[in-house]
Image: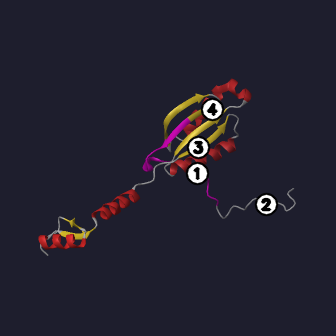
Amino acid sequence: MKLTDALRKAQSLGLDLVEVAPTAAPPVCKIIDFGKFRYDISKHTKDKKPPSAKLKEIKFRVNIDDHDYLTKIRHAEEFLDRGNKVRVQLQFRGREMAHQEFGMQLVLKVSDDLSSMSQVEMDPKITGRNVTMTLAPLPANRRKRRFAPQPRTDDEPEPAVSPTGT
């Protein structure tokens, strides 16, 4: 169809003549509502954007047990593996404020243990009764989990539990 005929037909319908494939031979055009066309394109580009990284928080106390520490480190690794940032927050209570160096040692241990998964985005900072630090995930090809739970084998028997609980 000739360009003048196509323009006349689009005007008679109250729509626009939009060139869809300009590199084709001959160029391809559509008679559509241009406003709706642009809206649909913006919806498609918005859907393609990856979701922005969320900020997850892990709270510690100064006198945390080794097993509890490992559990929290595994959770932090899982968050980082999914591409989320992690805020490490350590709370002091009561007399724990007298030994803030233990809290800083613990936060530095966390950053060292998670160094294969993340980099420190915000250095540890003491604000009142809290120490906070933010970790950002490394690129996916450089992440290595160190504290992933060990998969159970079928050969290992489950621990026996008596029905009486003794």
Label drawn at residue 148: 1
- Quadrant in which the C terminus is drawn: bottom right
Q: Indicate the amino acid at tag 3.
A: Glu
The disc labelled 4 sits on which kind of residue? Answer: Asn
Mark 2 in CB contact with mark 3 (< 8 angstroms): no
| Mark 4, other Cα within 10 Å: few <14 / some 14–19 / many ≥20 | some
Q: In the rendering, at what x and y percent does residue 137 appear?
A: 48, 45
Structural distance between the alpha carbons of marks 4 and 2: 42 Å
Q: Which residues are magenta?
A: 133-152
Which residue has dot 4 on it? Answer: 130
Q: CA distance from mark 1 to mark 3?
A: 19 Å
Which residue sits at x=68%, y=34%? 62
How far separated are the C-alphas under marks 4 and 3? 13 Å
Please rate how many residues cluster around mark 3, counting C-alpha atoms within 10 Å: few if below 14, some from 14 to 19, many from 20: some
Report the Cα–Cα distance between label 1 and label 4: 28 Å
Q: Quadrant of residue 48?
A: bottom left
Q: Is residue 149 magenta?
A: yes
Q: Position of residue 152 (x, y in %)?
A: 64, 59
The amino acid type, in three-letter code, at marker 2 is Ala
Q: Earlier in the sequence, mark 1 or mark 4?
A: 4
**Mark 1: amino acid:** Ala
Q: Which residue is mark 2?
A: 160
Which of disc 3 and disc 2 is earlier in sequence?
A: 3
